[in-house]
Image (cartoon, rainbow, N blue to C red):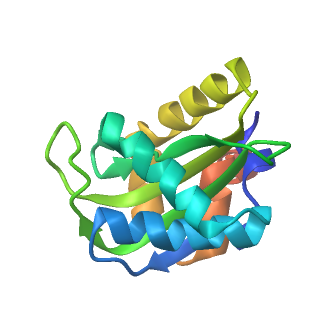
Amino acid sequence: MDIDKLLTPECVFAALKASSKKQVLEVLAGKAAARTGLADRDIFETLINREKLGSTGVGHGVAIPHGKMAGLSTIVGLFARLTAPVDFEAPDDQPVDLVFLLLAPEDAGAEHLKTLAKVARLMREPAVTDGLREAAGPGSLMKLLTGEAASDAA
């Protein structure tokens, strides 16, 4: 699934305030609930249970929390740039300031893994992450995440 199909402008947050990993997940669960119609508590529990298996902090200030949810018909994404980095227990011990949340239907299987891999590749690109950290607001973030900035320059 392409990033522009995952994200809507309403799901991109330029200045999310949170002081811990738990709070990041709670706030994003609430925002995901508003987008999906699912209960924020169920989303939060899914995310926390996934974190118990191992941190979704991938390094270089990036986390990709994810999980599968009953009641979803398509994969949903949210992106948040944090106002202050938080400890996400990432393998490089760097605090996280860029969070890309993915929720997938329970039966998503390979599509979920392909989308997760696509997001991970995107968020591994220093040009992208540097741009996300410097972007002025949600519109600029959305362009960077969906590749519009690259296609505009072509």
Q: Going 65% across and 31% down the picture, which residue do you hit?
A: 115
The answer to which of 80 and 140 lies nearer the viewer is: 80
Which of these two is toward me, 87 or 92?
87
Relative to 9, does residue 70 appear above or below in the rendering? above
Front residue (pair 91, 98): 91
Which residue ends up furthest to the right in the rendered image? 73
Residue 57 visible, this orientation: no
Q: Position of residue 114 (x, y in %)?
A: 64, 23
- In the image, 3: left or right of 71? left
Based on the displayed image, in which of its 4 quarters is residue 91 positioned?
top left
Residue at 72% over, 55% down: 7
Q: Is residue 125 left or right of residue 7?
A: left
Give how far across and how far down residue 117 sits, in percent.
Answer: 55, 27
Q: For the image shown, how many numbered marks are present on the structure?
A: 0
Position of 33 compared to 13: left or right? Answer: right
Vertical relation: 11 (above or below) 73 = below
Residue for point 48% across, 50% down: 47
Q: Quadrant of the C terminus?
A: top right
Residue that protrudes farthest toward the left in the picture: 93
Instruction: Using the image as rendered, state which of residue 137 and residue 107 is in the foreground.
Output: 107
Q: Is residue 16 above or below residue 142?
A: below
Please state, as top left, top right, bottom left or bottom right, where the N terminus lies in the image.
Answer: top right
Residue 150 locus on image (x, y percent): 65, 46
Residue drawn at (26%, 53%) of the image: 88
